Image: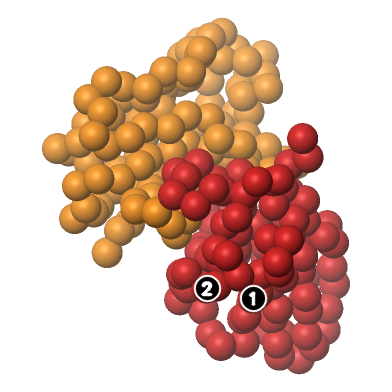
Chain colours: A red, B orange
Amino acid sequence: DAGVTQSPTHLIKTRGQHVTLRCSPISGHKSVSWYQQVLGQGPQFIFQYYEKEERGRGNFPDRFSARQFPNYSSELNVNALLLGDSALYLCASSRWGGTEAFFGQGTRLTVV
Amino acid sequence: AQTVTQSQPEMSVQEAETVTLSCTYDTSESDYYLFWYKQPPSRQMILVIRQEAYKQQNATENRFSVNFQKAAKSFSLKISDSQLGDAAMYFCAYNWGNNNDMRFGAGTRLTVKP
């Protein structure tokens, strides 16, 4: 079975631009969560989606948004990019109520 | 607020020796889960071991074991017979309830010397 897949793997954007990151969960997993990992730090929770509804939100500005599709894949959108948004963005999938999250390899976003 | 603290930014161990990584956490919840994740340079977070708070018995997975002290809110990871492939960043994480709002520590970089 395929694991969690994220695309693209690397991305370079200019300040003020918009970016969309994509995640496909493990087959059978209905919950997708997004994390931001700044260099040298642990991942920080951004969003959780389950059955296309937002079930949790971390302490991130409204420039960050996400959605989940009927096939349970998910997109993370970031508007008006700032230099500080440069980070590794991780997607994790799980079964609802499952305590174990499976992570993708992440998207490395660089804002210049 | 739930927080996770890893006080060792870096650790090193000789191949075949044993090393212990420390983690403490703060929570008011009684039912929760604790994890150790490994993140090699490939960036993918890999689950090493999991502990349910209601279980008194410490979790073990092959060469990896934990020392879970609920009253002290401590959750250390012991790696026995260290191998070169164990070199990575190790993150302690906490989760509660039916969600994936996992709280991570800042990580410990483990170096394994041949």
- Give the quarter of the image for residue B72: top left
Q: Which mark's residue is nearer the viewer, 1 or 2?
A: 2
Using the rendered image of the protein, determine whether residue B104 is visible from the camera's viewpoint.
no
Q: Nearer the viewer, residue B92 or A112?
A: B92
- The location of residue B76, given as percent across then percent down, is 35, 31
Q: Secondary structure at mark 1?
A: strand
Identify residue for label 2: A54
Q: In the image, what residue occupies the spot 73% across and 61% down?
A: A71
Q: In the image, what residue occupies the spot 62% across and 24% down?
A: B86
Contact check, label 1 and label 2, Cβ < 8 Å: yes
Q: Is residue A44 left or right of residue A104?
A: left
Crowd class of label 1 (few under 14; some 14 to 19; many from 20; radius 10 Å): many
Kindly identify the amino acid type of the residue bearing the numbered disc 2.
Glu
Q: Chain of mark 2?
A: A
Q: Which mark is residue B38?
A: none
- The location of residue A58, given as percent across then percent down, is 46, 72
Q: Which mark is residue A66?
A: 1
Quarter of the image that includes the N terminus of chain A? top right
Q: Is residue A55 left or right of residue A31?
A: left
Q: In the image, what residue occupies the spot 43% across and 57% down?
A: B99
Quarter of the image that includes the C terminus of chain A? bottom right
Q: Is the residue B42 above or below the residue B17 in the image?
A: below
Kindly identify the amino acid type of the residue bearing the numbered disc 1.
Ala
Q: Secondary structure at mark 2?
A: strand
Q: Nearer the viewer, residue A20 or B87?
A: A20
Do marks 1 and 2 share a chain? yes
Q: Chain of mark 1?
A: A
Q: Is residue B27 left or right of residue A49?
A: left
Q: In the image, what residue occupies the spot 82% across and 84% down?
A: A14
CA separation, marks 1 and 2?
A: 8 Å
- Give the quarter of the image for residue A49: bottom right
- The location of residue B33, given as percent across then percent down, is 35, 42
